[in-house]
Amino acid sequence: MDQKSSPATSDRRNFNRHEDLRDLLVRFQEIGELEVIEGADWNLEMAAVGELVTAHNPGRAPALLFDDIPGYPKGFRVLSGAANSYKRLAMVLGLPEPETAISFVQSYRDRMKTDFELIPPEEVKTGPIMENIQRDAEVDILKFPAPFIHEYDGGRYIGTDDIVIMKDPDTGWINAATYRIMVHDEKTAGIWISPGKHGRFIREKYFDKGEPCPVVVCCGQDPLLFLAGHAEIDHELSEFDYAGGHRGFPFDVIPSELHGLPIPSHAEIAFEGEIYPDETRTEGPFGEFMGYYASEASPQPIIKVRRVYHRNDPILTMAIPSRPPANFTFARGAVKSAMIWDEVEKAGLPGVAGIWCHEAGAGRMFNVISITQMYPGHAKQAAHLAANCHAGNYAGRWVVVVDEDIDPSNLFDVVWAMSTRCDPPEDTEFTRNAWSTPLDSMLQGPPYTNNRGIIDACRPWGWKDDFPKVAESSPEWKEKVRAKYPHLFE
């Protein structure tokens, strides 16, 4: 059956279909989750506003659209936190509006189990991204209001909520992942890629041949592409195909002028050039997703920019890596939770009741899995699988496994289980030398591996049926009270 005409795909096409970021902004405004802010400065102010608004109401904060940015034409805008709420994330993915964090994760995981199909992009000749093109001497990436995000950053970063598009020279695989992009000058950008990431593998293949690596950087796009771009999806799987599968229909892409790399036709801003192996400039430091300046300024390869493409009145998308909650960690944690759930079940783990990757752990470093215990060792199996599957492995720190009566998204529940069902000397284990990153605040240098803690906070298997009963009202009584006194729970 053709992927694009399968019943499941056709159903999703009619559910919350959006063509591009601008479609979504109209819908965000309709549901009251878009704030337009005029006059905020690109120098520290926009990022500080984004941090404060996100922290004020995590998971429910509005998206922020900055306009009238000093020094730039009206209409040259910056968007913060596009998909970083329950409602907006579900809207972007075309899923039902969730009642709880875990109901969102279940919806995403159910799609992966039942009706998810990769949908490759379709090539078209033109689109809105080609409304404006600057070539060679005309190139000036400083025409966009790239933010100076943190006070101790080494420069302005045009690429934070971005996708960096490369093509494997051997296989033709298109990778579209998120890496940070610093502005050096109007025609030069710096790029930092963590060891072990797919873009690094591709870049090194060109460098080993003594060749520059062709690249397109897209820094204003459908939030689905950003979600795919910073998720740990499988090697040699294109983020375009993965995001298209969730969208329910293909992304239209246009071959770039210089290298034929696919540019989303409805993207807002993109630029093209080459990464050079023998030319470096100081990149960083940059406040990162763990909430620290964990990597020092260092010489990194540069991108020589030779083409700039953008829509009229372009929108630059901005992530604000910082002390959690950041303006992308809710979305990251929710999607990562679903990906871990999907992977551990595919590995044969039964009885999963829920998974949540907490924003307090930057959406990837404090992960909780809830199970219905079915056999001796089940809890340890669950914890080790959640810690070591692909989606849960990179830069992790803690995995806690809890019983099915514990809501893994509720830190009160989780800490209570850790405090009352866990014997620390018996129920804590460690994994050593796991895949991490120079951004890890606990690492001082290579090799970039770290150690993990695994906590079994389930009732002890040998006497779980005799474990003390929980002291609380029954679910039936709680429901009766909610129905009788609804005003108390509004």
Image (spheres, rainbow, N blue to C red):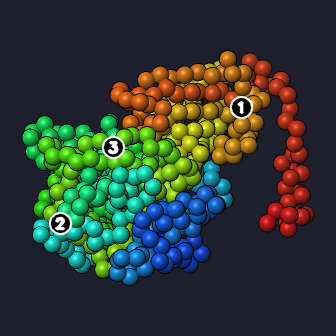
Residue 437 image position (x, y, % from top left): 39, 36
Q: Residue at x 29, y 41 (%)?
A: 298
Please identify the quarter of the rendering in which residue 18 is found.
bottom left
- Residue 434 is situated, as x and y percent measured from the top left of the image, at 43, 27
Relative image position of residue 226 (x, y in whole percent): 40, 57
Residue at the bottom extreme of this rendering: 74
Question: Mark 1 or 2 closer to N-term?
Answer: 2
Going from the N terminus, do you reach mark 2 or mark 3 first? 3
Quarter of the image where one finds residue 395: top left
| Quadrant of the snapshot with the N terminus | bottom left
Q: CA distance from mark 1 to mark 2?
A: 54 Å
At x 58% / y 27%, what residue is drawn?
A: 454
- For mark 2, what is the residue? 307
Check disc 1 and give the amino acid type.
Met
Type of amino acid under label 2: Arg
Give residue 210's quadrant in the image: top left
Residue that sits furthest to the front in the current view:
152
Please state, as top left, top right, bottom left or bottom right, where the C terminus lies in the image: bottom right
Checking the image for residue 179, the label placed there is none
Q: Are marks 2 and 3 in contact (CB under 8 Å)?
A: no
Q: Is residue 358 left or right of residue 187?
A: right
Q: Are marks 1 and 3 in contact (CB under 8 Å)?
A: no
The residue under label 1 is: 418
Residue designated by label 3:
297
Q: CA distance from mark 2 to mark 3?
A: 27 Å
Q: CA distance from mark 1 to mark 3?
A: 39 Å
User: Disc 3 on helix, strand or loop?
Assistant: loop
